[in-house]
Amino acid sequence: MKLPSLLYRSLILVALALPALAEVGKTPGASVDSLLELARQQNPEFAATRYEAAASAEKAVPAGALPDPKFRTEFRDITRMGEQNATLSPSRVGSTRYLVMQDVPWFGKRDLKREIAELEAEGVKGRSQGTWAELAARIKTAFAQSYYLHRNEKLAREILELMIRLEKSAQIRYAAGLGTQQDIIRAQVEQTNMKNELLALENERKQVEVRLNVLLARPATNRLAEPERLRPIPPPVKLDYATLEERVRTRNPQLFTETARLKAAEKNRELTYKNRYPDFTFGVSPIQYRNSVKEWEVMVEVNIPLQQGSRRAQERESEATLEAARSRLDAAANQVLGELSANLAGLDAAQRTEKLLATNLAPQAELNFQAALAGYQNGKIDFATLLEAQRQIRQARQNQIKAQAEAQLRLAEIERLLGEEL
């Protein structure tokens, strides 16, 4: 009875593992999500910032801990007033004093040091988040460029095939005495131009793939899958400036880091003012005579903060550092919000442009080309007019792809400013 049950469970596990196994051997690049996941796992720069953040987080515990205690031993009268040779045996010297001391800072200093270390760790964490936001934006931008170049290549090949057909049509008309040899030559020149453009697009596409492989920590020549689709643009309700402004102020990695620095500067100022008060050292000292301890001493040591000029300078330094942190935060907020506004406007313009091209200009150019093709075949228009109609439809489709890619670039920048996906 156990064997069928075990076999059944094994089959279920294999079935669940099949999608993951298939994904392992799949070439990345079809979607931007596959590239982002790979970069999160493999990019060394992002890995370094994660380790730095983890290391910084560990500093809070020692920053708030007491210093290690100190132990001292004193061998007194090691010759017993000249009665014996010098010795360091505790049972033979005049007396042995053991001293255990513990430094204790003024009340609240340890808590402030721990809080400063925690806030500095938050700043390092913010820099790590900023590194990922920058990396993700570069990957999204490169993916959009790759999509644009692949689609342009396809469009160029379609136009090349069209020009080959138009050349054949021109040859038929020339053979029938209805056209000129110049029409054939123009079609051939247009084909050569298209081939040159394909070479340029292929070269540019390979350069983008190299940049992506570098960001993914893969060999530069490794192949990437052809981009299948762009990410959908969020609905207008998610692109409201007021809503995004609030999210940027609370989640932008740069502002997060600068806010942590500001709070750390406030705590550091408070700690600097506490340095006006002394620190203590407490000690316990048993004294051994021969083979037994016969005396005990207790000691208290206090440092005297007499260097007031030095402390006042440190206090002024902490005040200036705090004001500098406030100014850096204000400057960063102005910059980030300005970039947010500009990218929202750019995204809106790209969307409207793409919609105009898709619904009006591209269909109009297509109709114009079909009419020009029919007119050329009927001998009503010349070949130059047909070529111009072909260029118009090609330009409209290129601009449409460009507007789609531009919208993706703007979206990537907005998400970089947010530090998260929309």
Image: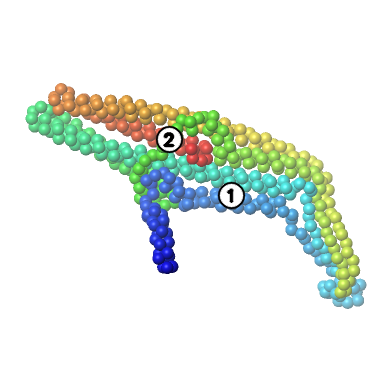
Residue beneath the point at 71% across and 51% down? 64
Compared to 95, does 268 lie above or below? above
Task: Give the mark nearest the N terminus, 1 or 2.
Answer: 1
Please tell me whether residue 251 is drawn above or below residue 10 in the rendered image. Answer: above
Left or right of residue 347, residue 365 in this image: left
| Residue at x 71%, y 48% (from the top left corner) | 113
Q: Bin the neighbour count of mark 1 within 10 Å (Cα to Cα): few under 14, some 14-19, many 20 and up.
A: many
Q: Which colour scheme is used?
A: rainbow
Name which quarter of the figure residue 406 lies in. top left
Q: Can residue 337 be seen in this view?
A: no
Dividing the picture into quadrants, the one containing residue 20 is bottom left
Q: Name the residue: 68% across, 53% down.
A: 61
Tell me the mark number nearer the camera, choosing from 1 and 2. Answer: 2
Q: Is residue 98 above or below residue 230?
A: below
Numbered label attached to residue 53 = 1
| Horizontal arrangement in the rendering, residue 136 relative to residue 102 (left or right) | left
Location of residue 333 in the rendering, given as x and y in whole percent from the top left corner: 58, 33
Q: Which residue lies furthest to the left in this view?
A: 176
Residue labelled with disc 2: 233
Indicate the amino acid at tag 2: Ile
User: Hey, what amino acid is under mark 1?
Assistant: Ala
- The image shows residue 344 at horizontal and vertical percentages of 47, 30
Q: Marks 1 and 2, how far apart in space? A: 33 Å
Residue toward you, 57 or 309: 57
Q: Residue lying farthest top?
A: 380
Q: In this view, does 119 lie to the left or right of 200?
A: right
